[in-house]
Image (tube, rainbow, N blue to C red):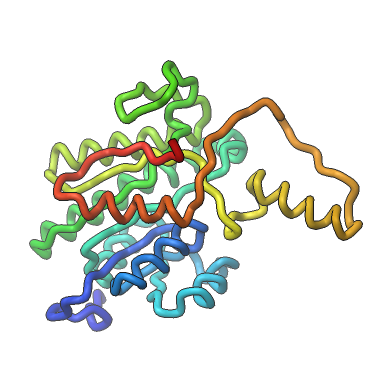
Amino acid sequence: MIRHDSNPVGDTKKSALITGITGQDGRYLAELLLSKGYRVYGLVRGQNNPREHDLRCESPEVEVLYGDVLDMSSLIQAVHVARPDEVYNLAAITLVAYSWQNPRLTFDVTGGGVLNMLEAVRLYQEVSGRTVRYFQASSAEMFGNAKEIPLRESSCFHPRSPYGAAKAYGHYMTVNYRESYGMHASSAMLFKHESPRRGTEFVTRRITQAVARISLGLQDGIALGNLHAQRDWGFAGEYVEAMYLMLQQDKPDDYVIATG
């Protein structure tokens, strides 16, 4: 049974639903929206997510909903409970190396999950008559083997990993729902962004963790891959401000988010 008790119809407070809320972006975004007076709902996959504890400690006001972007019924339920004015779809399998090991799962979650979320929002709009603004976290990995520098919104995609290809699918589905259904749906082509909340499976945290361990005499060094690779790195706390600002625009659009 779908319940609306936690967000009554007459409530004037804005509501936002964030998928992938236990990641660094989701947690910073939750804090930002709460500071602006939003009621924030976060979709969490499973009830043993180790980062859910961090979320609850940092932002206890967030109302946690359990669901999975692979499970359409759980998304429909979450959207009807949250009655969102804005949906931020941050859920994805985000490790490029992992995407080579599990390309099918990466496509299902990172690509197909976008379609499921868009469809859940579309159906909710049809039933409720309300307009929902939708944000899709796309990725600079979609550019892959870039044909021009600097990259811009009009640059061609040439993804070089299952992750990049899955993100490109989700990106184009967002464009299609915007153009076909008139949805206020926007995508951010996000370049790398980091923070102290970044998981230790990522290279920046691997380096900082290793430096700390070396300083304590717990290890001697760190082995890394290609030292000639170059990346544009920003701060996650600032990038979520860009996400928020994108959904405040009168017209939806797609934006490159980078340091410049």
Q: Which of 64/234 is in front?
A: 234
Horizontal placement of 191 versus 255: left or right?
right
Q: Residue furthest left?
A: 129
Q: Position of residue 108 (x, y in %)?
A: 43, 43
Q: Position of residue 247 (x, y in %)?
A: 25, 53
Horizontal placement of 124 versus 196: left or right?
left
- Residue at 82% in and 56% down: 213
Quadrant of the rendering where the C terminus is positioned? top left
- Residue at 15% in and 37% down: 179
Q: Residue furthest front?
A: 260
- Residue at 18% in and 60% down: 124
- Give the number of marks: 0
- Residue at 28% in and 53% down: 245
Q: Residue furthest top?
A: 147
Q: Position of residue 62 (x, y in %)?
A: 40, 75
Q: Position of residue 150 (x, y in %)?
A: 42, 24
Q: Is residue 23 above or below residue 47?
A: above
Q: Which of 136/232 is in front?
A: 232
Q: Is residue 52 above or below residue 72?
A: below
Horizontal placement of 55 versus 71: left or right?
right
Q: Which of 159/232 is in front?
A: 232
Quadrant of the rendering where the N terminus is positioned? bottom left
